[in-house]
């Protein structure tokens, strides 16, 4: 039970948007554990940058489509925000957008290796600050931000409940959380468990001829589970989006033809197009907003 973040009757509305996607390294109780690799943060940083330019059409599409949805969501919900935060900025793909939207933008991580890779971005944007901070026990004061982005991070945190509660605490009464995370039983998440078996991973790496690292997802959630945690943290879901189709073996073997098939299947598997719903009255009075995204297909690498 988290009592620290119970909204006061005088609070405003905090909304949440959410989308599901894929990522990979492990965070347990404020510590990052990377298995099966050397250079940890350096290797992961370079991998994250590679994914958006992958030679495999499906792999590239999965990551670029998520990126485009998040940038669009930030643009829709980030106007006139005064202070923005990204939790776990990775390769920093969203930091320039946050720096453009808010007079003050922050990127936080518990891995100094990641932050050191992003110093050039910090120098290029005078209103951007990179800070060593733990989202389970943040050093920032209550209601310090009115826009928070958490993309492909929550699945790496063992105590997701506490992380969401802490993000709720950090948001102002009219704040917005934009969240993306992979679906627990998506084909890519299931296939990745097979792909890293001894003997198979060598074949996968030979096929891709790109960095392939273990996902390190220690807390994958179903949509139902995530919604429950968000509600428990005091968020009202304002918008959701499900995207990304991955067909194992076909995606690797047939390149652009596989991608066209996956793109054709995506709307059908989604069922309905993304839609915005009006904010519903909440017994918690004013609660932060959340925008989220959910992918049908997980990424092996992130």
Image (tube, rainbow, N blue to C red):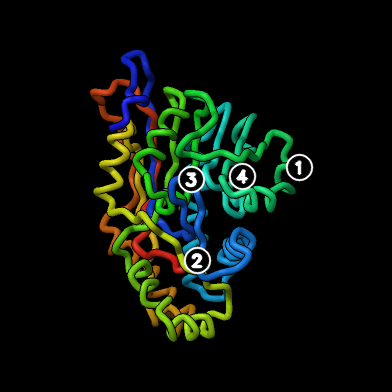
Residue annotated with mark 3: 30
Question: Do the numbered discs 2 and 1 sit on residues whose CB atoms are within 8 Å?
Answer: no
Residue annotated with mark 1: 123
Question: Do the numbered discs 3 and 4 sit on residues whose CB atoms are within 8 Å?
Answer: no
Label 2 to label 3: alpha-carbon separation: 16 Å
Q: Is residue 37 above or below residue 108?
A: below
Residue at 26%, 41% in the rendered image: 228
Q: Which of the two marks, 2 or 1, is nearer to us in this view?
A: 2
Sort mark 3 into few (<14), some (14-19) or many (20+) by Cα contacts within 10 Å: some
Residue annotated with mark 4: 95
Residue at 31%, 15% in the rendered image: 9
Q: Is residue 46 above or below residue 71?
A: below
Residue 186 falls in image quadrant: bottom left
Label 2 to label 4: alpha-carbon separation: 27 Å
Mark found first going from the N terminus, 3 or 1: 3
| Local SS, label 2 | loop
């Amino acid at each position: 039970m988290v009592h620290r973040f119970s909204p006061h009757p005088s609070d405003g509305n905090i909304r949440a948007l959410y989308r599901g996607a894929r990522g990979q390294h492990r965070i347990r109780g404020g510590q990052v554990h990377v298995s099966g690799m050397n250079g940890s943060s350096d290797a992961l940083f370079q991998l994250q940058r590679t994914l958006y330019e992958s030679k495999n059409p499906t792999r590239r599409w999965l990551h670029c489509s998520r990126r485009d949805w998040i940038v669009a969501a930030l643009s829709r919900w980030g106007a006139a925000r005064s202070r923005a935060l990204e939790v776990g900025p990775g390769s920093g793909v969203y930091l320039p957008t946050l720096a453009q939207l808010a007079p003050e933008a922050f990127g936080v991580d518990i891995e100094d290796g990641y932050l050191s890779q992003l110093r050039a971005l910090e120098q290029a944007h005078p209103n951007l600050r990179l800070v060593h901070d733990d989202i389970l026990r943040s050093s920032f004061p209550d209601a310090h931000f009115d826009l928070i982005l958490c993309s492909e991070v929550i699945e790496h945190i063992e105590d997701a409940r506490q992380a969401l509660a802490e993000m709720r605490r950090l948001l102002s009464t009219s704040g917005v959380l934009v969240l993306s995370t992979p679906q627990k039983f998506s084909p890519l998440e299931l296939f990745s468990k097979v792909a890293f078996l001894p003997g198979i991973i060598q074949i996968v790496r030979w096929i891709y001829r790109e960095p392939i690292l273990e996902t390190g997802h220690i807390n994958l959630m179903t949509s139902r589970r995530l919604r429950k945690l968000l509600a428990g943290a005091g968020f009202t879901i304002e918008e959701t989006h499900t995207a990304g189709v991955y067909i194992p073996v076909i995606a690797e073997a047939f390149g652009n033809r596989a991608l066209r098939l996956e793109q054709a299947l995506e709307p059908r598997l989604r069922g309905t197009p993304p839609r915005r719903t009006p904010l519903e009255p909440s017994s918690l009075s004013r609660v932060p907003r959340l925008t989220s995204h959910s992918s049908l297909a997980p990424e092996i690498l992130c």
